[in-house]
Structures are given as structure tokens and as C-alpha cells.
């Protein structure tokens, strides 16, 4: 009799355990199916590197509008520079125009990327050095930068830029 009760309890336990495992598997499948696609960090970094190379080429051609295409076109764009904080895409462009009024003042821009950190699947921090090679009478300029990028449906955009 004790043996029959033991077998019955064991069978009940195995049945409950099997049901719980099956429900857990169904939940896992549901979570996996509804989860966003995995973030490909190497592809994201390649996209940002390509974006910054294109931005450098635009600058070096004296084309500020082209250069600014990779900035978030929003009044919430944040630029931090030697003059302090600037908010907004248009104000940032206007400041660039004042500081670099012609192609000679703009020079040839190169970036030396030092670090790329993924803050989230759709946000990245990039730290590097910038260098402007200009005519001798104007002198070269250089400094460091940190930018925060956000992935939008149309691609990566700079949402905050701190350049010194």
C-alpha cells in the first residue's frame, strides 16, 4: 500500500514537473518571438565609422550643410564647445558658419577614433581626436570630442557633441 502511494505521488510529481517545464518552454518561445532583434555591435560600429568618414569628407570640401546631415535635426540637439552650451541644429550650424566662414578656415578634417561604447542597442558613445589641417597662416587646430549617437529609422545621428 505504501508502495502504491509512493508510486502515485511520484507519478503526480513527474506529471506536474513535466507540465511546468512545458509551460516554461512556451513562455521562452513567446519571449524570444516577441523580443527585438539582437543588436549587431560590429555592424553598428561600421555604420558609425562610415558616417564619420563621410562627415569628414563633407567638412574637407567646405560643405557645412553636408557635414551637419549627420546631426539630429532637432531643437534638442546639444553641442558643448569652448563657448558653452548650444541647443538646436540650426544654432549649431550658425555657430559653425561664424567660426569657419570659408573653406580655408575649415581646412581638412580628420578623426582619430579612440573608443566606441554601446550604451544601449540604439545609443552609442564615441570618443576621439579631431584635427584640422589648414594653411600655414591660419595654423592647424586639434582637440578631442565625445559624441552620443542615437539610431533612428533613417540611421545613426549625433544627438550630443562635446568638442574641445
Image (cartoon, helix red, strand yellow):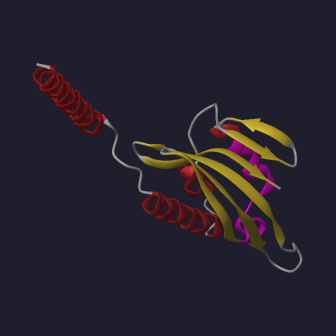
Find the magenta span and give its range. 92-108
Q: Indicate the position of residue 3 as horizontal and vertical percent values.
A: 13, 25
- Left or right of residue 57, residue 109 in this image: right
- Comparing 87 with 99, the one in front is 87
- Comparing 148 with 12, the one in front is 12
Identity of the residue drawn at 80% across and 38% down? 85
Q: Indicate the position of residue 103 as horizontal and vertical percent values.
A: 70, 67
Identity of the residue drawn at 61% across and 66% down? 56
The quadrant of the rendering that contains the C terminus is bottom right
Quadrant of the image occupied by residue 37: top left
Quadrant of the image occupied by residue 60: bottom right
Vertical position of residue 105 compared to residue 10: above or below: below
Vertical position of residue 44 compared to residue 16: above or below: below
The magenta stretch spans residue 102: yes
Q: Indicate the position of residue 36 as horizontal and vertical percent values.
A: 34, 40
Identity of the residue drawn at 43% across and 61% down? 43
- Left or right of residue 90, residue 98 in this image: right
The quadrant of the rendering that contains the N terminus is top left
Main secondary structure type of the part rendered in magenta: helix
The magenta stretch spans residue 41: no
Q: Indicate the position of residue 8 as horizontal and vertical percent values.
A: 12, 22
- Comparing 145 with 56, the one in front is 145
Vertical position of residue 102 compared to residue 29: above or below: below
Q: How many marks?
A: 0
Identity of the residue drawn at 79% across and 61% down? 144
Query: Can you name the residue that lies furthest to the bottom here?
Result: 136
Quadrant of the image occupied by residue 109: bottom right
Amino acid at each position: 500500500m505504501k508502495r502504491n502511494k509512493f508510486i502515485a505521488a511520484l507519478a503526480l510529481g513527474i506529471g506536474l514537473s513535466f507540465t511546468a517545464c512545458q509551460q516554461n518552454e512556451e513562455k521562452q518561445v513567446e519571449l524570444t518571438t516577441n523580443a527585438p532583434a539582437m543588436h549587431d555591435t560590429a555592424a553598428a560600429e561600421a555604420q558609425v565609422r562610415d558616417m564619420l568618414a563621410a562627415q569628414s569628407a563633407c567638412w574637407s570640401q567646405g560643405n557645412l550643410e553636408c557635414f551637419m546631415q549627420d546631426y539630429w535635426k532637432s531643437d534638442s540637439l546639444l553641442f558643448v564647445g569652448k563657448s558653452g552650451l548650444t541647443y538646436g541644429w540650426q544654432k549649431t550650424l550658425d555657430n559653425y558658419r561664424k567660426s569657419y566662414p570659408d573653406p580655408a578656415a575649415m581646412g581638412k578634417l580628420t578623426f582619430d577614433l579612440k573608443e566606441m561604447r554601446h550604451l544601449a542597442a540604439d545609443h552609442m558613445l564615441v570618443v576621439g581626436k579631431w584635427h584640422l589641417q589648414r594653411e600655414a597662416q591660419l595654423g592647424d587646430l586639434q582637440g578631442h570630442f565625445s559624441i552620443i549617437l542615437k539610431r533612428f529609422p533613417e540611421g545613426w545621428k549625433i544627438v550630443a557633441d562635446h568638442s574641445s
